[in-house]
Image (cartoon, rainbow, N blue to C red):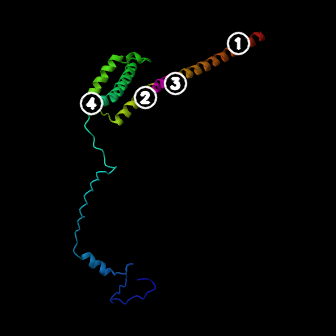
Amino acid sequence: MSFFHDTPAPGAPVKDDYIFHDGSAPDELFAEMQEPKQFFAAPPAPAPAAPAPDDPEKPDEEKPKTEAELKRAARTPAKFVVGALDGGLAYLSSVIAKSDESDSYKASKDEREQLTDLWAEYLKGKGADLPPGVMILVMTAIVYGPKVKMAWDDRKKNELVREQREKLLAQDMEIRLLRSQVEEKTLKEKLNTEKK
C-alpha cells in the first residue's frame, strides 16, 4: 500500500491488482509454475555433407612415402639435430672446462656425418618428421645458452670491478687522511722550532 491510497479497514479483504509488465497477474505465474514439467531433447545433429569429388577444398590424401623419400626427408632434420647437439655439447664442454674456446670440443666432420646418418635412420622410422616446436626450442637454447653464460661472466667481472673500485676509494681516503696527519705534524714541528 502506498501513502496516498486509502487504508482498508482491519479484517477487510485486500484487493491485489498488481499486473506484470507483460499484462499477466501473479496468480497466472503461480499456476504456470505448478504445471507438470516437459522434457525436451535436442534434435539430432545433421550428418556432415560429403565433399564433392571435384571440390577444391577437399584435402589431398597423402600417398605413402617410399624408403628413399623417407631417407631423403629425414636427412634435413637429422643435420639440424646433429648441428644443434654438436654446438650445444661443445659449448657445455667449454663451460665445464672453464674455457673460452668451444671449437676444440666439437665433433669432427666424419663423426658428424656418422651421427647424421644415424639420426636420419632414426627419424626415418618416425616418419622423417621433427616437430617445428622441438626445432625452435633446441635452436633457442643453442642461441641463448652462450649469451646467458656471457651475461653470468659479465656479472662476475662487474662485481669484481665494483669491489676493486670500492677498495681504491677506501685506500684513497686513507692516503688523504695520512697526508693531512703528516702535514699537520710537520706544521706543528715547524711552529715549535720557530718558538725556540
Where is residue 135, by image quadrant?
top left
Q: Nearer the viewer, mark 1 or mark 4?
A: 4
Q: Could you tell me how far apart the alpha carbons at marks 2 and 3 are, in whole angstroms? A: 23 Å
Secondary structure beneath label 1: helix
Query: Where residue 69 sits: x, y (%)?
Result: 29, 31
Query: Where residue 40 sits: x, y (%)?
Result: 23, 68
Is 68 left, or right, of 179 in this rendering?
A: left
Q: Could you tell me how far apart the alpha carbons at marks 3 and 1 are, in whole angstroms? A: 42 Å
Is residue 63 within the magenta segment?
Answer: no
* Residue bearing mark 1: 186
Q: Earlier in the sequence, mark 2 or mark 3?
A: 2
Q: Could you tell me how far apart the alpha carbons at marks 3 and 4 are, in whole angstroms? A: 49 Å
Q: Earlier in the sequence, mark 2 or mark 1?
A: 2
Secondary structure beneath label 2: helix
What amino acid is found at the position of numbered circle 3 in the picture? Asn
Can you see residue 172? Answer: yes
Q: Is residue 41 above or below residue 187?
A: below
* Residue bearing mark 2: 143
What amino acid is found at the position of numbered circle 4 in the picture? Lys
Q: Residue at x 29, y 26 (%)?
A: 119
